[in-house]
Amino acid sequence: MIDGTGKPAVQDAVVCISPDGRIDFAGPMAHAPTPPEDALVVDGRDRTVLPGFIDCHVHLGFDSARDMTRRFLYDPTLEVFKTVDRMHRTLAAGITTARDLGGLSAGFRVAVEREMVVGPAIHTAVRVLSHTGGHGDISAPCGFDPTAGMTYLCDTADEARIAVRKVIREGADVIKVHATGGMGSPYDQPDDQGLSIEEIRAVVDEAARHGGRPVAAHAQGTAGILNAIRGGVTSIEHGYGMTDEACDLAGEQGTYLVPTLSTLFDGIDKATMEPHHYEKKMRWMDTTVTNFGRAIERGVKIAMGTDAAVGPHGQNLRELMHMVSLGMRPMDAITAATRTASELLGVSDRVGTLEVGKVADIVVCNGDPLTDIALLGDPANLAGIFRGGLLVKNSNLLAEAPLCSASHG
């Protein structure tokens, strides 16, 4: 058992799930309680049990960066079913909680909560906040917006406050701002600055006034990263330009880094990407590799995120393999996707670790990911997934077990 806390793995472990979907016990077999006669007992020998994983940066509303700008061509009802399919694939990949940072309405979160669909627990930003001409502004010269209202444009601190109020009205759990340009947008660069530090501070203040919602900053170049941290954001997304100064400032402020390495290693396809997108990715790759290693060395709080959609859906835990390849220990990478990610999302009292009283979000993996972290990146190696104590994926874990409860359909 790898419990997600960062403590050493427990051999010959037992995890007990109560009827209400909570963890009753998680520890050595020698200390485990005797199960009730009617208990369902799962034999996990030669497997590893872990907490359900948390992806802190996904875009479930579309399949790719190109798809994002073409959704207006598609039937909106069909798009709902496609989104649900992406949610299913994400859950089957071991992600029991996902934070969507743009393009997903709050209705999908509610549908999961009401057990209308099976999927990961959702935290959503609904839309992103960007400035005119910035990374979130993909309006055509004629004025047409192909992203179908995914962005609120704000060019003053007051407009930024109003935008925060609007996304909260739409059900946002987290506020997403663009502090820099980006890779996929055609008219700016990652080094370009997005919202100003005054505008970011206004967003953070407004979010704090409405329940203390976290603020995630798309921030790639160094100047924008520094603006975002000084502005008080909760997390830096991507963080390609995390210099020593940025790492130290993040440490002082307690700011999290969500590096999304999968977009570099799994999301590059010259044949399907726009030329400007491909060129920028290739140009920034070495910088990102260097700066992620710097963030590890300087003790920045790192939470896992994939930017799935820019990278592929349903292979989310390949991100751990990339983290390890760039210097993280396997246990630290797993912790980044469990305990640390739950702390970033503000749900560490409920999920993220296998501890008594927590929700039974559990992944059962064939083999030992501490000796081969790549095992987790292949959904075929995930023999069983529980969410809220319900077995929602059963790949030869239990021959007779149903896929999920009747209430899930």
Image: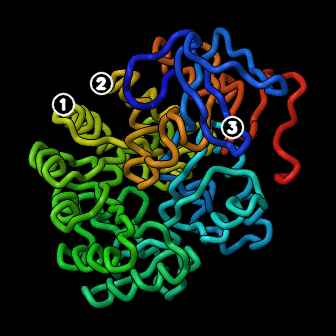
Q: In the image shown, does 300 or 361 lie closer to the viewer? A: 361
Q: Earlier in the sequence, mark 3 or mark 2?
A: 3
Of the residues under marks 1 and 2, which one precedes in the sequence? 1
Choose the circle earlier in sequence order: 3 or 1: 3
- Residue drawn 60% across and 18% down? 32
Q: Position of residue 161 (x, y in %)?
A: 33, 85
Q: What is the number of the mark on residue 327? A: 2
Q: Identify the disc placed on residue 85.
A: none
Q: CA distance from mark 3 to mark 1?
A: 40 Å
Q: Secondary structure at mark 3?
A: loop
- Relative to 264, is 347 above or below? below
Tell me the residue at 32%/89% (across/down): 159
Q: Residues within 10 Å of mark 1 (few under 14, many from 20)?
A: few
Estimate the spatial distance between the alpha carbons at disc 1 and disc 2, rounded to whole Å.
9 Å
Residue 385 screen position, x and y as percent = 68, 34
Q: Are marks 1 and 2 in contact (CB under 8 Å)?
A: yes
Number of numbered discs overlaid on the protein picture? 3
**Residue plotted at (76% across, 58% down):** 115
Q: Mark 3 sits on what residue?
A: 18
Q: What residue do we see at 68% from left, 16% from top?
A: 44
For label 1, the residue is 297
What's the amino acid at mark 3?
Ser
What type is the residue that disc 2 sits on? Answer: Gly
Image x and y of residue 330, in percent? 40, 22
